[in-house]
Image (cartoon, rainbow, N blue to C red):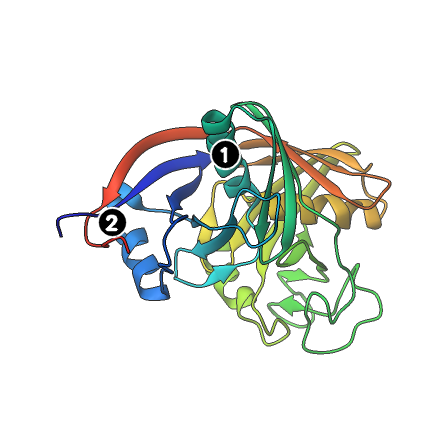
């Protein structure tokens, strides 16, 4: 086609992000288009952040977040850092606000290496996560994989941090084939909206090591909302303090669960390249 839609390829600790700005257009990408964009080497993504005209006064944009399988996510911490840095570069402002399906999120941009997202408040109620059946205590639910008498993984903590998360506590995050286990757990009937699946090791009161199978994206080098989920669940189980460095395969994120119940996530981003989605005509 003669005209396409520009995109910017970025990453947050290796979490592959594509940013598309459709502000000023009525265009909304569908699941098939998102999958096609993710399938192309130049625009491959774990999550795609698509900016639309703001719905709420004072926000930069309404942001639709697509997973690589075309499904929509409510939250993406690494992607939020990417779009905030781009907005800061364009406007010169360091404090920015965006709206997603998870709500209105504030972001503070100090530098490309230090961007802080207010990820909101965690929700621990079984209906809020959501779970398919009632659990009074979501610090550990009855869910296991493997033989009943010797399960491979069991008793995860669950929470909604914009999207559903299950965190399994392990001694070694690399001792499990998360690429095989992740898809089974993501789509387990207990999670009616599917879930992000994490393996977490508490290395110290201020340190967690994490690997994540992301709902709709698979194994990723980093997942901001999962780092937030692991932090609040660990603190809730009294395994850690409320300020923790979470080390993912792509590097560290700094997470603080403040006394006012809001979660702050701080980390870097990288700009990889710009491109044009030639097969998608702008409206």
Task: Write the residue at 39% across / 49% down.
Answer: 24
Q: Quadrant of the C terminus?
A: bottom left
The first of marks 2 and 1 along the sequence is 2
What residue does disc 2 label?
A: 40
Q: Is residue 171 visible?
A: no
Please provide percent x and percent y for residue 205. 80, 34
Task: Write the residue at 39% across / 29% down.
Answer: 271
Furthest-left residue in view? Answer: 2
The disc placed on residue 136 is: none
Task: Write the residue at 44% across / 28% down.
Answer: 270
The disc placed on residue 250 is: 1
Q: Is residue 149 above or below residue 250?
A: below
The residues tagged by marks 2 and 1 sit, at their Cα atoms, a distance apart of: 22 Å
Please provide percent x and percent y for residue 167. 67, 54
Residue 204, by quadrant, is top right
Count of picture labels = 2
Q: Is residue 7 visible?
A: yes
* Crowd rating for badge 2 (residues with CA inside 10 Å; few <14, some 14–19, many 20+): few
Q: Is residue 64 left or right of residue 77?
A: left
Please provide percent x and percent y for residue 195. 58, 63
Residue 70, by quadrant, is bottom left
Task: Write the residue at 53% across / 35% down.
Answer: 84
């Amino acid at each position: 086609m003669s005209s396409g839609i520009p995109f910017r390829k970025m990453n947050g600790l290796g979490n592959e992000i594509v940013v598309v700005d459709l502000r000023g257009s009525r265009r909304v990408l569908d699941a098939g288009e998102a999958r096609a964009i993710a399938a192309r080497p130049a625009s491959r993504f774990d999550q795609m952040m698509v900016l639309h005209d703001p719905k709420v006064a004072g926000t930069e944009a309404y942001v639709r977040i697509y997973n690589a399988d075309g499904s929509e996510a409510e939250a993406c911490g690494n992607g939020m850092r990417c779009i905030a840095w781009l907005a800061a570069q364009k406007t010169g402002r360091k404090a920015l606000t965006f709206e997603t399906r998870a709500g209105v999120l504030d972001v503070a941009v100090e530098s490309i290496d230090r961007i802080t997202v207010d990820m909101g408040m965690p929700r621990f109620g079984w209906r809020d996560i959501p779970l398919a059946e009632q659990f009074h205590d979501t610090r550990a639910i009855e869910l296991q994989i493997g033989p009943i008498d010797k399960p491979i993984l069991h008793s995860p903590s669950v929470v909604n941090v914009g999207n559903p998360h299950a965190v399994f506590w392990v001694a070694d995050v690399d001792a499990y084939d998360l690429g095989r286990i992740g898809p089974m757990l993501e789509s387990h009937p207990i999670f009616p909206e599917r879930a992000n699946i994490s393996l977490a090791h508490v290395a110290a009161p201020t340190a967690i090591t994490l690997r994540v199978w992301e709902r709709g994206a698979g194994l990723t080098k980093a997942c901001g909302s999962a780092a937030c989920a692991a932090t609040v669940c660990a603190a809730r189980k009294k395994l850690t303090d409320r300020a923790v460095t979470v080390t993912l395969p792509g590097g560290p994120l700094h997470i603080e669960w403040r006394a006012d119940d809001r979660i702050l996530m701080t980390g870097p981003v990288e700009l990889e390249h710009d491109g044009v989605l030639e097969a998608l005509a702008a409206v």
